[in-house]
Image (cartoon, rainbow, N blue to C red):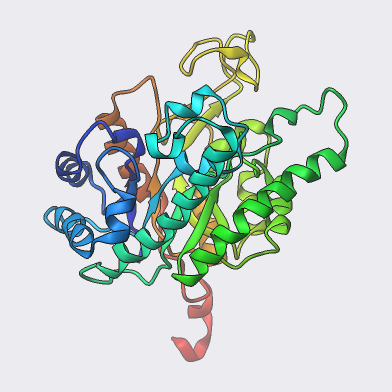
Amino acid sequence: MARPVTLFTGQWADLPLTELAPLAKQMGFDGLELACWGDHFDVKQAADSKEYCQERWQILADHGLTAFGVSNHLIGQAVCDLIDERHQAILPPDVWGDGDPEGVRQRAAEQLKLNARACRNFLNAKPHHDLDFPAVVIGFSGSSIWHACYAFPPTGQAYLQKGFDDFGRRFLPILEVFDEVNVNFALEVHPTEIAFDIASAHRALEAVKHHRRFGFNYDPSHLGYQGVDYVKFIREFRDRIYHAHMKDAWWGHGNGDAGVFGGHTDFGDYRRYWDFRSIGHGDVNFEDIIVALNDIGYQGPLSIEWEDIRMDRVHGATESCRNVRSYDFTPSRLAFDSAFEREKQ
């Protein structure tokens, strides 16, 4: 059967879950990828309270929805980042604390460990098992070397390796907790993270010694405009695709004023070379993606992360859900020409 289509709730955190759940069902979704901000999923409550987890499931069940994991991009960003005032806007007060950078990083790491236990408790409370898919927390890592991406002042590999070593040192203890509770961590490969393309994703894997709990949240929208082969990524990391976002982008647009780096313009500025688009309105080839996901045997959810500043979000998410269903298909279990054989006629 075709894969379930879910909605990542991060961009809908202004709506309480009790309002978003019926809307998601109305838009055609099978389930939700719950963000750990807004009121959608409280990490501390889920880690401590079976009743809280059951209450979350009841809201989903009341509207015929399911879930396969949770996302905590905002906390993850602070684990390895060079902390500044921007982080205060996205972090809860108990993680930000006094704003001391190393203190923020350590508190974020502890919160991510707690997130693993919260996810485990949440999925243990699932009232029915509709898909045999490993529990997963999707998120970011931050990076201590993203500022050196352009490699000027001249930047040697020894300097960059320190960043990967820092990532490994901070994330290996986190991954051990994920292993204890049988939950995977799916890093969304994305600019500003330790892994933002195929080459850096390989180095990130090496930095955590190919820990079995570390994999990737596949999202083509962050790869295509960079010039990264987003279909090759699937096959390159066939055993590490732990979750998949369906999200579109276009590139080669704009008026030539702003290139790949964005020119310090806002999303939606007509001068931009690239932008995120509603699925079907960008340049991502989702048919090739579905073929590649079938080739590697990925049977998890296709989670729509909807972002398009040019479009009403309810219209866009509804259309995106419909489009993803039209792209997805169940792979064949027999050769198309097997019926030619005499004994099968």
Q: Quadrant of residue 257?
A: top right
Write the residue at 59% across / 60% down.
173
Q: Quadrant of the C terminus?
A: bottom left
Locate residue 3, reporting x and y percent.
37, 60
**Compared with residue 255, is residue 335 higher up or lower down, i.e. above or below?**
below
Q: Is residue 3 visible?
A: no
**Compared with residue 341, is residue 127 higher up or lower down, i.e. above or below?**
above
**Which residue is situated farthest in the bottom direction here?**
343
On the rendered structure, is 32 left or right of 286? left
Q: Is residue 179 visible?
A: yes
Q: Nearer the viewer, residue 225 or 43?
A: 43
Q: Quadrant of residue 9?
A: top left
Write the residue at 66% across / 48% down.
167
On the rendered structure, is 143 left or right of 180? right
Q: Nearer the viewer, residue 52 or 20?
A: 52
Q: Quadrant of the N terminus?
A: bottom left
Locate residue 211, reporting x and y percent.
63, 65
Locate residue 37, reporting x and y percent.
33, 40
Count the marks: 0
On the rendered structure, is 146 left or right of 121? right
**Which residue is situated farthest in the front direction here?**
98
Locate residue 263, reporting x and y percent.
62, 13
Q: Quadrant of residue 66?
A: bottom left
Write the residue at 73% across / 42% down.
163
